[in-house]
Image (cartoon, rainbow, N blue to C red):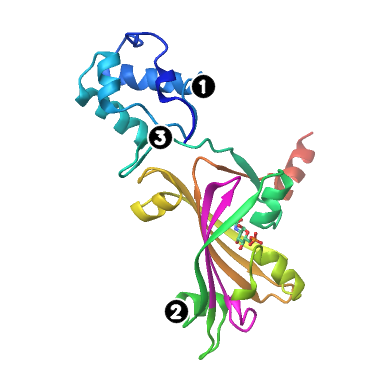
């Protein structure tokens, strides 16, 4: 936490922007204070009582404005410690035509990478893992579950599954999975990625430091070796406010030919 919470009150009493219900006026005023830097990411919001007093509104109005800002991901509430301005997240673009790793994507932008391990071990595979990874009966699966942070901002929750024949000791993966696979000659060369929009449940939202119900991009990546064998089955949950997936599109061959014929 940094900054002086009282610096948000630039005038006394606070002058709310006019128009609409009071809670929306107060909401807009708090958003403005964040935009003009009077209160910064990570700073604590003044108490409900202080805000009500200085803005000359009821505490119910303050609570309603704050609730909406929490829902929008502008503020975050931590039980027992108060309400804070949400950390600012930089949007990151990931090309959909290059098979890169999280570490490489961030390094290219000069951003630091850190992971918090949620799961790392050898397990009996689920039926879905058996089918997707093409496991034989009796084969085990290595699971790597990580919260991935960039510049200390949580970006994604990633759960990777690989055959234990490829990764018999998951403990050896410290930072980058792809660097490890590269060293053992198992780096994927092709992948199919499926992306769909979702809303974060309570537990995942908490890990990603956003309000429950916030938007997420859920991505499933199945990666292949040159031999055609599946090497990785990874499910990732990316914060909707941090990632842009960018695809380059080209005119299809048939249309190009038709276009030329019509010239
Ligand atoms: C990316 C991949 C993920 C892969 C990871 C390896 C997406 C959606 N997913 O996050 O499938 O396991 O990179 O990253 O891009 P690492 O080498 O940094 O561990």
Residue 152: percent from left, percent from top: 57, 47
- For ligand 1, give the image quadrant: bottom right
| The disc label shown at residue 127, or none | 2
Q: Is residue 158 magenta?
A: yes
Q: Residues within 10 Å of mark 3 (few under 14, many from 20)?
A: many
Q: Residues within 10 Å of mark 2 (few under 14, many from 20)?
A: few
Report the magenta residues as a range: 142-170
Residue that extends furthest to the bottom in the rendered view of this protein: 138
Q: Residues within 10 Å of mark 1 (few under 14, many from 20)?
A: few
233 and 253: which one is in front? 233
Give yes or no for contact between labels 1 and 3 (Cβ–Cβ under 8 Å): no
On the image, numbered disc 1 is attached to which residue?
A: 37
On the image, numbered disc 3 is attached to which residue?
A: 84
Q: Secondary structure at mark 3?
A: strand
Residue 226: percent from left, percent from top: 74, 72
Q: Is residue 227 above or below residue 87?
A: below
Which comes before the other along the chain, label 1 or label 3? 1
Q: Is residue 161 above or below residue 165?
A: above
Q: CA distance from mark 1 to mark 3?
A: 14 Å
Q: Is residue 11 above or below residue 202?
A: above
Q: Secondary structure at mark 1?
A: loop
Q: Is residue 8 magenta?
A: no
Which comes before the other along the chain, label 1 or label 2? 1
Classify residue 91 by image quadrant.
top right
Q: Is residue 187 visible?
A: no
Q: CA distance from mark 1 to mark 2?
A: 52 Å
Q: Residue at x 39, y 15 (%)?
A: 9
């Amino acid at each position: 936490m940094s900054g002086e919470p009282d610096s948000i009150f630039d005038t006394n009493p606070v002058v709310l922007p006019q128009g609409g219900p009071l809670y929306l006026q107060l909401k807009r005023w708090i958003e403005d204070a964040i935009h003009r830097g009077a209160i910064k990411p990570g700073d604590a919001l003044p108490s409900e009582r202080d805000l009500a007093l200085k803005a000359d509104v009821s505490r119910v109005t303050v609570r309603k404005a704050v609730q909406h800002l929490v829902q929008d991901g502008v503020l975050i509430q931590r039980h027992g410690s108060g309400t804070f301005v949400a950390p600012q997240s930089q949007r990151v673009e990931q090309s959909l035509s290059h098979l890169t790793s999280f570490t490489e994507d961030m390094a290219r932008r000069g951003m630091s990478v850190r992971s918090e391990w949620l799961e790392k071990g050898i397990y009996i595979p689920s039926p879905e893992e058996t089918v997707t990874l093409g496991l034989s009966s009796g084969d085990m699966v290595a699971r790597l579950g990580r919260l991935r942070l960039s510049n200390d901002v949580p970006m994604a929750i990633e759960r990777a599954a690989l055959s234990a024949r490829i990764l018999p000791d998951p403990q050896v993966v410290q930072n980058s999975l792809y660097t490890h696979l590269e060293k053992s000659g198992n780096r994927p060369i092709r992948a199919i990625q499926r992306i769909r929009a979702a809303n974060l449940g309570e537990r995942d939202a908490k890990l990603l430091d956003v309000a429950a119900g916030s938007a997420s991009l859920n991505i499933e990546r199945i990666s292949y070796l040159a031999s055609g064998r599946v090497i990785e089955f990874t499910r990732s949950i990316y914060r909707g406010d941090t990632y842009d997936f960018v695809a380059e599109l080209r005119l299809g061959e048939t249309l190009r030919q038709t276009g030329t014929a019509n010239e």
